[in-house]
Image (cartoon, coloured by chain):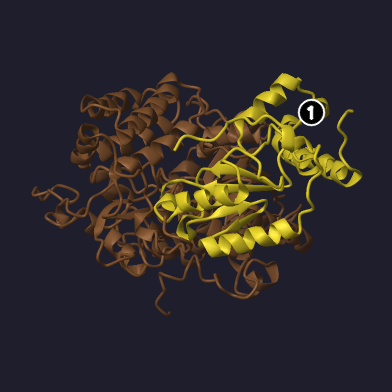
Amino acid sequence: MTAIDTSRLLTDRYGLPDSHTLAAAEKAGAYATARKVLTSIQPDAIKAEVKAANIRGRGGAGFPAGMKWGFLPPKDPNKPVYLVINADEGEPGTFKDRTIMEQDPHRLLEGCIIAMRAIGANVTYIYVRCELVVSIQRLEQGIRDLRARGFLGPRPFGVDHPMDIHVHPGAGAYICGEETSLLNSLEGYRGEPRLKPPFPAVAGAFGMPTIVNNVETIASVPDILKLGGAAWSALSRLPNDGGTRLYGVSGHVKNPHVFEGPVGLTLREMIDRCGGMLDPTRPLKAVIPGGSSTPVLRPEDLVHAPDPAHPLHAWHGKSHIDVPMGVDTMRNLGTMLGTCCAIVMDSSVNMVEAARNLMRFYHHESCGQCTPCREGTGWLAEICDRIVDGEASEADVDLLVDVSNNMMGNTICALADGTAMPMLAFVRKFRGEFLEAARKGGVADGRLDRAVASLLGGRAA
Amino acid sequence: MPFQLTPDREKHAEELFTRYPTRRAACIPLLHLCQQQNGWVSEEVIAYVAGRIGLTTAQVQGVVTFYTMFHQQPVAPNVVWVCRTLSCEIRGAKRIQEHLEERLGCHVGGVSRDGKFSLKKAECLAACGQAPMIQLNDDLHENLTLESLDRILDAVAARTPAPPANAPHLSAPHGHAAQKE
C-alpha cells in the first residue's frame, strides 16, 4: 500500500476539472465508500469506526464526534432522528468549510449518506449561511443529481433505508452557528440559543433526536470508513485527536489560503506553508489560532512546563507557536484550537484597534437574549472605542477585565465566553499597549491597514 | 395591494413546505423567495408569509428583524456588502470602504448618487484568505485592489438601468445612518 499523502486526503478532488459535479466526483472515487458501507456494514460498526478515528469536531468546540453520535437515545419508532449539518461558517478568520462545499460538495453529501445510515436518520438538513450562494447552488445541484441517480431516495444503493437531504439557507446571523440557535433558525424562529439540557441528541430539530455536525467533520467520514478508523486516526501527529484536517491562514502572510495537513501542525509551520510573513521587515506580532473567539498568542511567549507529568512538557521552553495545533494542546496553552483557521498579525497592527474590531463584531452579533452578553459585548466595544478615541483613563483597561469576568459562564450559550476570553487575552498580553493608548490619548490614526497600503493601488491612503 | 408570488415561485414555495415536518420551518426560505421577487421585505410580504404559514404578522416580523440579510427598507437594484471584520480589516477593508463611499457618493447604510447601489457593512463573509472582499448581490469579489473594484462596479453600473426618480429606495428612510469611524 502506498503511503497516504496527508495533504491530499480530504482535498484530493480539489482542483480537478468540474470537481463539484457528480460525474467528476464519482469518476474520482466518490460514493464507492458509501456503496460499500451501506451494503456491507451494520450501523453500529460504522459508529465504531468513527469512534476509533478519534475525530474531534471541526466546528470549533472539538468535541469527539464518535462520542456525540453515542448520545442518541435508543431508537424509538415514533421519533425520527435528524442529521443537521452546520454550514453557517461565520467565525471571523474561518473560511475552510466553504472550500468543501464549493470544490467538493459530494464529499459532504457522501458523508451525510454514511452518517444517516450510522445514526438511523432519514433526513439531513444542511444549514448554509445564505451569503454562500455558490455553496448552496452546488449542494442543491448535487442533491438533485443524487436523487436522479438513486443514491438518495427510498433505497439508496439498494438498501432499505430511505434518505433525503435538504439545504436550508440562513439569513445572516453569526449566532446561528451555535447549534441550538441553528435549530431554532431551522424551525423558522429567531435564532436564539436554547437552554441545555435537553441536548440536541435527545431533543433537537422539531423536538426529535438530532445530531448536529460541522461540514468538515462529516466530509471526513467517507475517508474514515475507507481507511478504517484506527488507520485514519494514526495520520495525526497527536494522540486522541485523529486524522487530517483543513488549516486556514489569513492576514499578514504572503499567500493566505486553506490547505490540508495532519492534525498537529504548528502555527509556525502553517505560516511557512503560506509563504511566510507578508513583509520580512515586519515580524510576527500576534496570532489568533482558530477563529476570533480563541485567545491570541504571542511568538515570544514560551511554554513553561518543567513537570514531566505536564501535558505540554514535551514543548517546555519552546515558543507558543511551536506547539502542535490540537484540541487538547491548545486548551493546555490557555487558548483553543477552534476552527484551526489562524489570523496572523505583523508588527504594524495595533492590538487595541484589533480588539476593538472584534468587540464591535461580537456586539453586533450578540442575540440579546442574555443580559450579561447583550450588555457586556456592548460595553466592551464602547470601552475599546473610548480607548481608541483617547477619551479613556487607565482604569478603563481594568474595566475591560471586570466586564469580561462578569460575562463568562453567565449566559445560555458560548458567545459571551467567546467574547470575554479573547478580550482578556488581548488585555493580559498587550496590557502595555492598552495602557499607553489610555494614557496618551488614543491610537495614532485608528487604522489597521498600514501593512497593505501599497498593495491596494490608487492614491496613498 | 396584497403581495403574491409569481407562478414559478409559487411552485417553489409549495415544494418548500414538503421539506419539513412543520409549516413554520419554511419561514426563512419563503422570506428569501419573496425578497428575491420584491427586492425587500415589505409589510405586504410579511402579511403574505404569515398567511401562508399560519403565523401572526408579529411572529414573522420577529423573524425578519433578527436576521441581517432581510432588507427592511427598499434597497437599490444592487447591494454592496463590504466586509470589515479583522482578517479583511488588516488587509485593507477600510480603504475599500472609503473608496466605495467616495465613488458611490454615500456612506454605509445609504444609496449611491446614481441610485443604482445600496452600500452596507458586513461581518465576516468566510473569505478571510481572499481579503479584502465585497459581496455584490450574489457574488463574492475577492483579493480586491482599488482598480479591480472599479472595474467590477463599472461593469455592474453599465448593465443597471437608471432607476426612476420616484423609485422607493431613493426616498426610503435608512435604518442606520453613516457609521462612526
Residue A426 lies left or right of residue A249; in this view the side is left
Residue B71: give x, y in percent of width and height.
68, 36
Residue, x 26% and y 55% (percent of image)?
A: A347
Q: Please name the amino acid that badge 1 sits on.
A: Ile
Quarter of the figure with the C terminus of chain B: top left
The answer to which quarter of the image holds residue B73 is top right
Which residue bears the numbered disc 1? B53
Residue, x 49% and y 65% (percent of image)?
A: A10
Chain A hue? Answer: brown
Residue B159 lies left or right of residue A398; in this view the side is right
Q: Reply above or below: A130 against A246.
A: above
Nearer to me, A121 or B6: B6
Chain B hue? Answer: yellow
Mark 1 packing: few (<14 Cα in 10 Å), some, or many (20+)? some
Residue B168: give x, y in percent of width and height.
77, 35
Q: Which residue reaches farthest left?
A: A306
Residue A45 lies left or right of residue A308; in this view the side is right
Q: How many dots with numbers?
A: 1
For disc 1, the chain is B
Residue B123: give x, y in percent of width and height.
51, 43
The answer, for residue B144, to whether it is visible in the render is no
